[in-house]
Amino acid sequence: MTPQAKTRLVERAVAALLIKPTIRAAARECGVSSRTLQRVMKQPEFESAYRDAKCRLVREATAKLTANSGRAADVLRKVFDDRKATPGARVAAATQTIRLTLEGYEIEELERRISDLEKKRETF
């Protein structure tokens, strides 16, 4: 396999694994066997590309959750203020949004701290 073909397969594998529920389905999407896809998944260039792609997706999702967290807090405030309301589903959605936003923030903060530590380690 040429280096260009190998790179294209890695790219297709990353994309397929991010959208398909199983390795088998991702392999079909790529036009390869599950066994071939599993071999590709063991390659360092795949691992790096997959990690980067997942990171981008998580950051995009975190940004969307963060954008909605103010509205979620408003829903909670309105629910708390409305003594006649029975908004179980709305409260659950608002609570989940806030929880996920906080988790996303914690992850980003940990990433920043790890990056800072890695930079400090490089200077030694």
Image (cartoon, rainbow, N blue to C red):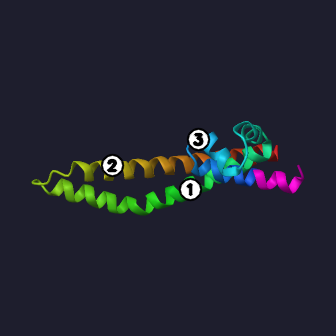
State the residue position of label 3: 22
State the residue position of label 1: 59
Q: Which residues are magenta?
A: 1-9
Label 3 environment density (alpha carbons within 10 Å; few <14, some 14–19, many ≥20): few
Residue at the farthest left position: 84
Viewer-proximal residue among 50 and 74: 50
Label 2 environment density (alpha carbons within 10 Å; few <14, some 14–19, many ≥20): some
> Which element is circle 1 on?
helix
> Which element is circle 3 on?
loop
Residue 33 in magenta stretch? no
State the residue position of label 2: 95
Tell whether 82 sits left or right of 38: left
Q: Amino acid at mark 2?
A: Thr
Q: How many marks?
A: 3
Q: Quadrant of the C terminus?
A: top right
The image position of residue 25, as x and y in percent, is: 61, 44
The image position of residue 36, as x and y in percent, is: 76, 40
* 3 vs 1, front mark: 3
**Could you tell which of marks 1 and 2 lies nearer the N-terminus?**
1
Q: Is residue 112 visible?
A: no
Residue at the farthest right position: 2
* Residue at the image point whose x is 29% and y is 48% from the top: 92
* 2 vs 3, front mark: 3
